Image (cartoon, helix red, strand yellow):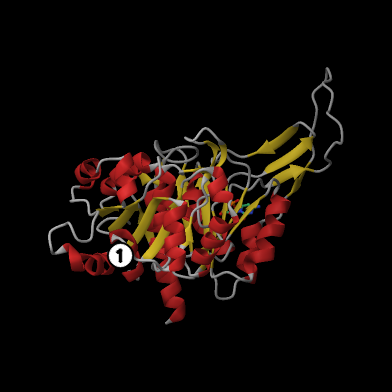
Amino acid sequence: MLKGKFVVLGVTGSIAAYKAVELVRLLKKAGCEVQVIMTKSGCEFVKPLTFQVVSQNPVIIDMFKEPSRWEVEHVALADKADVFLVAPATANIIAKMAAGIADDMLTSTLLATKAKIIVVPAMNVNMYENPITQRNIAALKALGITVLDPEEGDLACGYSGKGRFPEPTDIVEHIKVILGKDGDLKDKRFLITAGPTREPIDPVRFITNHSSGKMGYALAEKAVQRGARVTLISGPTNLTPPLGLERFIRVDTAEEMYSAVMKHYADVDVVIKSAAVADYAPKNIKGEKIKKQDSNMTLELKKNPDILQELGNKKSNQVLIGFAAETNNTIVNAQDKLKRKNLDFIVLNDLTEAGAGFAKDTNIVTILHSDGRIEKLPKMLKRDLADEILNRVLLYLQNRMS
Ligand code: C5P
């Protein structure tokens, strides 16, 4: 999604300037055109030549000493930018931006741009926490400029605290979210469930399903990056929730997932139920650890609510998508679920196929539509499959509206 985007990167006088080199490399790798503008103090930390080589573009520093065409270049560049990053941003540039000062190439271009601006502060913790800096950051935010939070940790100045430059990979994810705001799913409200549920037997044991949550998290991430407003309801996983979610709700049991889904269902346009919900839970949860005995033991299970079934019964105008993981009679079972749960389409994992199913990064699925169409998709990364699924959701949304 970053392919072909024009990124202007302002580098200012912070020791973290060297980390911006990696940021440029990542942006180039993602297919962006990158134009670096450095302040004079930025050049004290990293030579412009370094940025010139990684960005494959001449670096702009001085408004007047460059070839004459740069004199109007600040306006041209300002217009051309899809996104304008200031990374690292010192307290000084933040103050100048907040005051509207334009006394060098970077500040002049910033003032002339209508592109989305992302500021990545990196400085000494005391400078960052200074009420003047905080006031300036608040002023930028109030104007719609994105200012990322610095990370906590050891700082180059010897202090420890908030002020570190975030990981360049995280900055790239932020750019995707911000650029995606006008995407093809703009403002569509999604509810996505992911991961397994965990049904306690006693304080130390539980019943669960195999599920890494990767598919649901990939769907949430991609939906956000296409402009959707996403609520992700997740069972226990090892994954970090994607950036830019409207809401992240962490649950354990199917009952908790049920309550969370029901609470938000009425407010959404699309529900994607990719969670592997346990169908049964222990009937009586023991308050104390069950002791081992010589004989076998029997565990009585009660049926959990079928969340998707209930959503299907309630469905009005929503697009409703389910997942099915099957080991036998796969198509017939999935078709049955599709009808029974009143879904628009169901994504079928055939667990007997190599490269499909839990924990892996790839998946092989068949999509069964309510109108009878059956699409078998090739093996692909879950992140790419997420986009394929969202492309189909978009068609259903468009059909609803027309
Ligand atoms: O019927 P089955 O459980 O195989 O259906 C799978 C689909 O139903 C998945 O989308 C899953 O998230 C959803 N489901 C649910 N509530 C349950 C069980 C499954 O929403 N209790």
Relative image position of residue 209 (x, y in whole percent)? 61, 40
Q: Give the residue drawn at x 52%, y 53%.
A: 323
| Furthest residue toward bottom | 402
Considering the numbered disc 1 on the image, is that residue within a helix, a strand or a loop? helix
Residue situated in front as seen by the camera: 5 or 132: 132
Q: Amino acid at mark 1?
A: Thr
Q: Nearer the viewer, residue 83 or 181?
A: 83
| Residue 223 in view | no
* Quadrant of the snapshot with the N terminus: bottom left
The one of 65 and 338 positioned closer to us in this rendering: 65
Image vertical order of residue 35 relative to residue 181, above or below:
above
Horizontal relation, residue 367 to residue 204: left or right = left
**In the displayed structure image, the side of residue 178 where residue 69 appears, left or right:** left
Pick the quarter of the image with the C terminus.
bottom left
Residue at screen point 39% across, 68% down: 184
Tell me which residue sits at (54%, 70%) in the image. 269
290 relative to 322, above or below: above
Residue at the extreme top of the image, as rendered: 294
In the depicted structure, whether residue 243 falls above or below residue 269: above
Q: Dot 1 corresponds to which residue?
A: 109
**Total residue callouts:** 1
Residue 284 image-quadrant placement: top right
Query: In x, y percent, where is residue 116?
Result: 38, 65
Q: Measured from the top left, where is residue 294 in percent x and y?
A: 83, 17
Left or right of 222 on screen, residue 275: right
Q: Residues within 10 Å of mark 1 (few under 14, many from 20)?
A: many
Q: Residue at x 30, y 65 (%)?
A: 109
In front of the other: 122 or 360: 122
**Is 100 left or right of 161, judged from the image as shown?**
left
- Which x, y percent locates residue 125? 55, 44
Q: Quick check: can you spot residue 87?
A: yes
